[in-house]
Amino acid sequence: MTTITAERAREIARDAYVYGVPMTGSYKTMHAFSIDKGNRQYKGPFNQILSFARVFTPDDTAFVTPNADTPYSFASLDLRAEPMVIEVPSIEKERYFVFQLMDLYTFNFAYIGSRTTGNGGGRFLVAGPGWKGDIPKGITGTFYSETQFVNVVGRTQLFDAADLDNVRKIQDKYKIIPLSSFQGTKPPPPAESTAWVEPVSESDERTSLKVFDELAFLLQFAEPPHPSEAALRASFASIGIVPGKRFDPSALSDDMRQAIKAGIADGQKQIDDYRATLGGKTDQLFGTRDFLHNDFVVRATGTQVGIGANSRDEALYPILDKDAEGEPLDGARHKYILRFAKGKVPPVKAFWSVTMYGLPGQLLVANPINRYLINSTMLPALDRDADGDLTIYIQADTPEAGKEANWLPAPKGPFVVFMRFYWPEEDLLNGKWKIPAIMKAS
């Protein structure tokens, strides 16, 4: 290992921590869903569609701010041996669906769905770095990942509870097919057996040197580095973060260990400071490599705000964490309202929703009516004010008679509200439509 000063090691550790937050966040989800069979969040093995004809609840804790609007379909793709083919059926034009393809860096490098590829169905090939094979006939589109592992998140619109069987039938037709099976050829040798690293615990992931052991493990699946990152990745090796090698803090001097640990704190401070500037706007946190301009602080902030969120053209996720007076939301202290003026609900081509999350965990909130959101598919069942406005009542206790239909239950404590605008219209993308503030009701 090249001799460097403690000051320089601290700078490198800061950069490595910020760079690594998205990768370790991706891996945490992948490990829970497809590797650790003892995890209660385990869904199934690699290279299989794992669908759930239900919406998420407070029992789903594998990642923060889960969507409770659309039944999910998940897949963890292992592209080391060969590419995979994602097959989707033809879906009625009124129903929105999307498959988001996210590499280990958390770049949303490709989309399959209503907005991008349409509802006519197709077969889409997903290849990892280094694959240079021919595209076979029958492939609708081809996407290349910078990393050998890909998290796929599918969402299929649910119109109401009676629609679950229809969603299930669609999900049953989602398939992942190895390229060799698609072509009817002999499969290649499987990838070498992997000694999976245990993800760093939630209590340690923002402070412990263990994060660099996990990062070093993951970097081997993101080779070669993007040309713009080659020098940065080389600097990581100078403090012992080498792709596929164990990071060994015991090999460092006490001064160097303390410098590297201080670098982690510096990196987290960069993320926290940037997050404090967002003002609830998150649409610049998620997207392709080009969209994010290699801004690693932005990318890491997106991971901690809500890993797996869509790019802005697919969905917007405004965060309402303060009321109109600038005070943090707290269901133990106040009741609140969110009011949309007549004819001024969010302009979207698919649907919109308002979802409740408790703090600090940013998870769905258990409540007596098992309602975690209010969305546009519920509009026929919601009551309107005398002037035609739509008022949502956000509070911990059951509202007074006549307001229950519009109740979004809150915890008796701090909370945050995420809005979701799927397939946003131009007025949302350009900011012409303004998001109403949450107001104190008492």
Image (spheres, grey):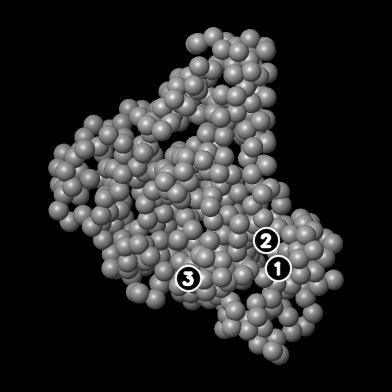
Task: Provide residue 217's location: percent of width, then percent of height.
Answer: 46, 27
Q: Which residue is mark 3?
A: 425
Identify the disc placed on residue 107.
none
Contact between labelled residues 2 and 1, with CB atoms less than 8 Å apart:
yes
Q: CA distance from mark 1 to mark 2?
A: 8 Å
Determine crowd level at label 3: few under 14, some 14-19, many 20+ residues with C-alpha closer than 10 A.
some
Q: Earlier in the sequence, mark 1 or mark 2?
A: 2
Q: Amino acid at mark 2?
A: Leu
Tell me the element at label 3.
Answer: loop
Label 2 vs label 3: CA separation?
20 Å
Which residue lies under the disc numbered 2?
A: 320
Residue shown at 51% from the left, 65% from the top:
429
Q: Earlier in the sequence, mark 3 or mark 1?
A: 3
Q: Which mark is residue 437?
A: 1
Task: Determine crowd level at label 1: few under 14, some 14-19, many 20+ residues with C-alpha closer than 10 A.
Answer: some
Q: Earlier in the sequence, mark 2 or mark 3?
A: 2
Q: Amino acid at mark 3?
A: Glu
**Could you tell me if residue 348 is visible in this image?**
yes
Q: Nearer the viewer, residue 159 or 119?
A: 119
The spot of residue 204 in percent (x, y) is 65, 32
Is residue 191 left or right of 1 when viewed as pictured?
left
Residue 173 place in picture, x, y as percent:
32, 62
The residue drawn where x is 53% and y is 33% is: 20
Please, is residue 99 above or below residue 405 in the view? above
Q: Quadrant of residue 279?
A: bottom right
Who is closer to the viewer here, 45 or 262?
262
The Cα atoms of the two marked residues, 3 and 1, are separated by: 20 Å
Residue drawn at x 23%, y 57% is 140
**Percent x, y of residue 137:** 14, 53
Element type where label 1 sits in the image: loop
Please name the residue shown 25% across and 37% down the image: 131
